[in-house]
């Protein structure tokens, strides 16, 4: 058929429509409510939250368990809650409780079982009830402690502040029908000790029927419901004003690439509870860094989070029955960030099967109109498969090529992978026909054959993901339905006699119902995975993972529509233009610094006095592969010592206090033999009693007055011990201990096989380092710097001053000693 002069113009409008709808998806994803300033009125106020967060994160600072800041934060929260108690409605019973707990548990993390021992861990518990209220309660949880390196404005100052607002509002609500418990827990970053203490030891835990957990792994945008295990709770979530949820997030969390967890695990594992888990996830660059300050929490984000939690609680507390059944098989999502949709996996299976049958029937009818045989259809399907595979291969290939000179070149902005891998993915889609079609073709039949090939592709993917039980298979359903709708409209417009290209309105019908929704989901992929690439280890193939994730994002955003659309144009010329664009973009990214001060490279710095090996010096570790050598070169010039790369085994010993994260870092050591050693050391006292049955019983006392987060490592076959958990069957053991600010020693007793002496390796972090933080304005977005007023501080301060502006450091003083 001769090429119509109108086809390029119409194709331009189709592309413009795709761009416009994609931008609409971007806007919907980022639209936030107007924040309410500080107020005493009975409405949720972001302004009230920001005031508390600023006090916690800026005035107090890092709230590491075992430091005086932890105690200061406890007192701050206790005083404010006591004030709310005095102002409560007379009909509301307000119980304010301090739980201080000791215990132990096994924590499965990164394929490792970590033995956790905690002592003097603090929880603040608020119990709101009334004379006529049911004792059945909803539990709301957040944590006020922080990790070693962060002021914790979002993680989890935001959750604490939102809970404080809930206490203020519900303590004045005389319409309660059920009880509510608020757990301000004091030890989550130590591997969830405080939530374990509450759910296993406190009497109120028996009244809890469901838990709502508030977390953060970012500081911008909307919070997302990313874990849920109850149909009734998911239905309750439908009543919130700003829903933002997707069972797709369950699938992402299940990949294992997100090396973090929340207190939600403890409530489910030890309390057998149902619940909902919420978290901020955008701008995850600030997560567990000194960038986690209140200024970096986006205006409107706290209002969005708080409005939703308040509405959810109001709905649940008004229910007659708070009994829930576990059900983790739900499909749920928010269409266009407006309509919350939820249904069972059983229903989805029937829906997907029915939709696939209808799609096959529609394809057969269109094949008849095009005189296509079954072989032609299979050829179209295989061609689509090959084209999509080439899209992925081209993106990964381009990424690996750039990585040879500039690893992680796309890292500094979540949108950069779209700019880099968007053209390469589209280029890959077009490569097959470029090399298999001998001359430029403008063919309306081929346009429809590509459309049918795409429809068959999504039928197969839908059925496979459904059979695999993947919750995000609803994405495949959407793509299939809009393609089938396009075929139905085409058949209606052509009246079964196909003689021209697909109508512009066919593309409209395909794009409008889904594209904005799909593009928003694709962006969410990138918001999660791109920043995470900076903290999953130097050995992780992030330059493969991110282009694959980006290609998936483009696939669910209907970028595949270029396959039929290109038959309206000179496909060879279009392919060459996109190839030139891809080459140009790749060249730019090959020389782009992957890091910026607001998207920094994480550097873990420890000054260590190791009496076990006789070494003392600076350990510098990295959790990603990019720009390692420039950092090491800067430190070599500052310290006048060449770095030595440590083996995996040495790294595990060097960073025992970070076990098991120590498996996922690359460590380099600067041996500073001429420097002053750390004055104090932890002391491990042991008392051995040899038993007649060939075993020995050992009493252990670990004195750690000047240290927090102590770890003892040893090799033995343990028959029994005084901890509340069964001893692991392996011979190599690491026991991580954490104590509240008042703790200076801990004890345990164990019986082991054999009479031979056992050597204990004891590690700890300097306690005083966390007490001396000063404001810092020398680096963009960073509000804190380590003081040089403690033992190892002068060395660490020198390292901090030597690091490039595009890094964010964790600085600790560490010790290691041997005891028998």
Image: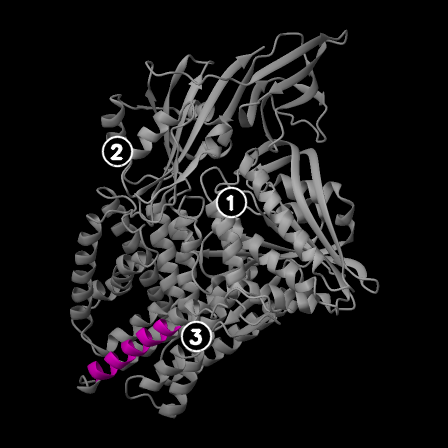
Q: Helix, strand, or loop for circle 1? A: loop
Compared to residue 655, the image places residue 306 above or below, namely below
> Which of the labelled discs sits on residue 734, or is there none?
none
Q: Is residue 567 left or right of residue 199?
A: left
Q: Is residue 417 left or right of residue 264?
A: left
Residue that label 2 marks = 629
Q: Nearer the viewer, mark 3 or mark 1?
A: 1
Q: Is residue 328 left or right of residue 421?
A: right
Neighbours of disc 1 within 10 Å: few (<14), some (14-19), many (20+): few
Residue at position x 57%, y 41% in the image:
72
| Position of residue 398 measured from the top left corner of the image (x, y, whole percent) | 25, 51
The residues tagged by marks 3 and 2 sit, at their Cα atoms, a distance apart of 45 Å
| Position of residue 663 measured from the top left corner of the image (x, y, whole percent) | 46, 32
The mark nearer the N terminus, 3 or 2, is 3
Q: Helix, strand, or loop for circle 2? A: helix
Residue that label 1 marks = 260
Q: Quadrant of residue 343?
A: bottom right
Q: Which residues are magenta?
A: 7-24
The residues tagged by marks 2 and 1 sit, at their Cα atoms, a distance apart of 27 Å
Q: Is residue 668 visible?
A: no
- The secondary structure making up most of the magenta span is helix
| Position of residue 368 measured from the top left corner of the image (x, y, whole percent) | 40, 83
The residue lying toward the viewer, choosing from 57 and 414, is 57
Neighbours of disc 3 within 10 Å: few (<14), some (14-19), many (20+): many
Q: Is residue 363 visible?
A: yes
The residue lying toward the viewer, choosing from 482 and 808, is 808
Q: Quadrant of the N terminus?
A: bottom left
């Amino acid at each position: 058929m001769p090429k119509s002069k109108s086809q390029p113009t119409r194709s331009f409008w189709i592309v413009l429509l795709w761009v416009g709808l994609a931008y609409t998806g971007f806007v919907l994803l980022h639209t936030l409510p107007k924040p309410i300033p500080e107020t005493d009125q009975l409405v949720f106020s972001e302004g009230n939250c920001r005031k508390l967060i600023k006090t916690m994160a800026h005035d107090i600072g890092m709230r590491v368990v075992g430091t005086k800041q932890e105690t200061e934060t406890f007192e701050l929260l206790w005083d404010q809650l006591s004030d709310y108690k005095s102002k409560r409605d007379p009909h509301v019973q307000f119980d304010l409780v301090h739980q201080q707990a000791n215990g132990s548990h096994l924590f499965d993390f990164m394929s490792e079982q970590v033995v956790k021992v905690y002592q003097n861990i603090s929880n603040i518990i608020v119990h709101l009830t009334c004379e006529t209220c049911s004792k059945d309660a909803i539990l709301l949880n957040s944590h006020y402690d922080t990790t070693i390196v962060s002021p914790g404005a979002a993680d989890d100052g935001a959750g604490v502040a939102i809970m404080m607002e809930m206490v203020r509002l519900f303590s004045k609500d005389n319409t309660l029908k059920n009880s509510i418990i608020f757990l301000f827990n004091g030890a989550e970053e130590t591997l969830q000790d405080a939530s374990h203490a509450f759910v296993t030891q406190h009497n109120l835990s028996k009244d809890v029927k469901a838990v709502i957990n508030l977390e953060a792994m970012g500081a911008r945008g909307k919070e997302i419901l990313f874990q849920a295990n109850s149909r009734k709770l998911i239905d309750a979530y439908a009543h919130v004003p700003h829903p933002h949820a997707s069972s797709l997030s369950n699938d992402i969390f299940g990949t294992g690439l997100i090396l973090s967890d929340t207190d939600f695990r403890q409530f489910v594992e030890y309390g057998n509870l149902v619940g909902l888990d919420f978290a901020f996830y955008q701008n995850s660059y600030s997560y567990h860094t000194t960038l986690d300050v209140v200024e970096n929490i986006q205006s409107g984000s706290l209002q969005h989070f708080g409005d939703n939690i308040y509405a959810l609680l109001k709905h649940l507390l008004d229910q007659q029955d708070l009994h829930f059944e576990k059900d983790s098989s739900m499909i749920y999502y928010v269409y266009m960030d407006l309509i919350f949709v939820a249904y069972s996996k059983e229903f989805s299976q029937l829906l997907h099967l029915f939709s696939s049958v209808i799609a096959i029937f529609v394809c057969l009818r269109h094949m008849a109109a095009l005189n296509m045989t079954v072989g032609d259809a299979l050829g179209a399907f295989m061609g689509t498969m090959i084209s999509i595979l080439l899209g992925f291969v081209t993106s990964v290939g381009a990424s690996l090529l750039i990585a040879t000179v500039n690893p992680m070149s796309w890292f500094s902005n979540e949108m950069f992978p779209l700019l880099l891998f968007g053209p390469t993915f589209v280029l890959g889609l077009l490569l097959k026909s470029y090399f298999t079609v001998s001359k430029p073709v403008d063919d309306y039949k081929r346009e429809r054959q590509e459309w049918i090939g795409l429809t068959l592709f999504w039928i197969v993917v839908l059925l496979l993901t459904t059979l695999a039980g993947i919750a995000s298979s609803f994405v495949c359903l959407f793509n299939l339905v809009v393609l089938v709708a396009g075929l139905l409209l085409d058949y209606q417009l052509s009246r079964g006699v196909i003689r021209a290209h697909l109508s512009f309105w066919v593309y409209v019908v395909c794009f409008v119902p889904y594209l904005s929704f799909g593009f928003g989901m694709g962006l969410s992929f990138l918001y999660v995975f791109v920043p995470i690439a900076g903290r999953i280890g130097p050995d992780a193939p992030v330059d493969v993972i991110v282009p694959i994730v980006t290609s998936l994002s483009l696939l669910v955003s209907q970028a595949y529509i270029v396959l039929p659309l290109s038959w309206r144009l000179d496909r060879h010329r279009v392919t060459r233009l996109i190839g030139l664009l891809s080459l140009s973009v790749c060249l730019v990214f090959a020389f782009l610094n992957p890091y910026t001060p607001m998207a920094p490279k994480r550097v873990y710095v420890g000054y260590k006095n190791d009496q076990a090996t006789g070494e003392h010096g600076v350990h510098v570790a990295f959790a990603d592969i990019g720009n390692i050598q420039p950092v090491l070169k800067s430190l070599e010039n500052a310290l006048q010592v060449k770095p030595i790369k440590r083996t995996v085994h040495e790294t595990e010993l060097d960073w025992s206090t970070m076990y098991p994260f120590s498996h996922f870092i690359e460590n380099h050591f600067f041996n500073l033999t001429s420097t002053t050693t750390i004055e104090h050391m932890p002391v491990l006292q042991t008392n051995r009693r040899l038993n007649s049955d060939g075993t020995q019983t050992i009493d252990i006392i670990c004195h750690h007055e000047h240290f927090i987060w102590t770890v003892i490592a040893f090799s033995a076959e343990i028959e029994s011990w005084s901890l509340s958990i069964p001893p692991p069957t392996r011979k190599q053991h690491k026991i991580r201990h954490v104590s509240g600010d008042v703790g200076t020693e801990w004890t345990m007793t164990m019986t082991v096989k054999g009479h031979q002496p056992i050597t204990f390796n004891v590690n700890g972090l300097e306690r005083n380092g966390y007490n001396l933080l000063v404001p810092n304005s020398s680096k963009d977005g960073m509000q804190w710097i380590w003081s040089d007023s403690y033992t190892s501080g002068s060395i660490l301060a020198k390292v901090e001053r030597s690091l490039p502006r595009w890094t964010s450091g964790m600085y600790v003083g560490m010790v290691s000693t041997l005891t028998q």
